[in-house]
Image (spheres, helix red, strand yellow):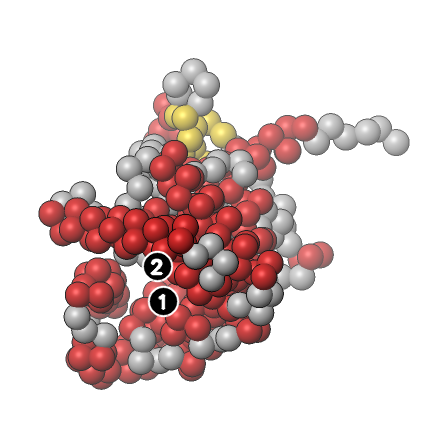
Amino acid sequence: MMAINNSGVARRRAHHTLLRLCTRVRRIPPHSDPLPEEREQPKWRWRTKDACKQEVGRGRSPLLKGEGSVRGKEGGEYSRGCKILRRVPGRVALLAAFGICLAVGAADETGSKFAKQAEQKYLEARKQFRSKPNDVEITWQFGRACFDWAEFARDDDQREQLANEGIAACRQVVAKVPKSAAGHYYLGMNLGQLARTRTFGALKLVPEMEKEFKTARELDEKFDYAGPDRNLGSLYLDAPGWPASIGSKSKARRHLQRAVEIAGHYPDNRLRFLEALLRWGETGDFERERKSLAELWEKARKEFSGEAWEESWLNWEKRWKAIRQKAGK
């Protein structure tokens, strides 16, 4: 039997993986979790920008409903399925692409304020950590501070440095106290920050993130207002699907819904579930959850009040407004 050369397929799959990591892309229709034998292997066509425009000009439809572009070696722009998008800088957050909804600092006066607060908390936490390196709680608190300041990192080098500090601290925690939910939780979060600085290596970190969040969930599912379920659901929601990564609609639904069940009073949980339902086009469940969030919104404002929650509310208000606009409410 003649051997088949699959090197071209492998290269195209590598291109696809890089594309999903380095560009902002709107979602391909949600995963339906087919059985392995039912999964269809996608056909890829990579064209220059001009060739792609010619295809569209002839009235031909794209092969796939995803969009994205990467820069070729000779400066040409290549696009999947004849859909053209602008090239996005490499510093786009992989973690954000996976839906872990983080309040990223804006480049304005407000964002500068939050960045200074995060830096100050990091410096204070580092000072305490250095004075008491064997204190488990102080150590994971330092890991959290590393993650928070990494959100405002000036570049990937600084983000990687902070992420590695946080990872080292949290690994120290879980080595001493394997049943520390906080240690596993912030280890997963800092791994996510590290993934933001990687290209080909980013997807390799996803299974480890999944493992740490699962462990944190087993130890304390209520930690950080059902944070383990919220983060697992977000990973499954926006990660590339099989065979590239762990994306799964059914798992995303299970964990996001569980986060709402555990801490439905926490706005981030309901917002994330609403965003998923809107993406999936599930209007019935979406309308029910929308009304629930609208009813508790003002109550949540009173419960989660003060300077410590200012940044979160900026993020939540923006997402809540976007959800209502998309739903026409």
Residue 21 placement (x, y as % from top left): 46, 41
Vertical arrangement, residue 316 with respect to residue 81, above or below: below
Residue 114 appears in the rendering: yes
Viewer-side label of 1, 2: 2
The quadrant of the image that shows the N terminus is top right
Label 1 is placed on what type of residue?
Arg
Would residue 282 be seen by someone viewing this image from the given angle?
no
Above or below, 308 against 4 in this view is below
* Percent coordinates x, y for residue 97 in the rendering: 40, 50
- In depth, the one of 225 and 123 nearer the eye is 123
Distance (Cα) linking label 1 and label 2 = 8 Å
Q: Quadrant of residue 314?
A: bottom left
In this view, the residue farthest toward the top is 74
* Residue 244 drawn at (x, y percent): 59, 47
Q: Mark 1 near mark 2, Cβ–Cβ under 8 Å? A: yes
In the rendering, at what x and y percent does residue 158 appear?
Answer: 36, 37
**Would you call the spot at circle 1 few (<14 residues within 10 Å), some (14-19), or many (20 or more)?**
many
Q: Quadrant of residue 266?
A: bottom left
Judged from the image, the secondary structure of the residue bearing numbered disc 2 is: loop
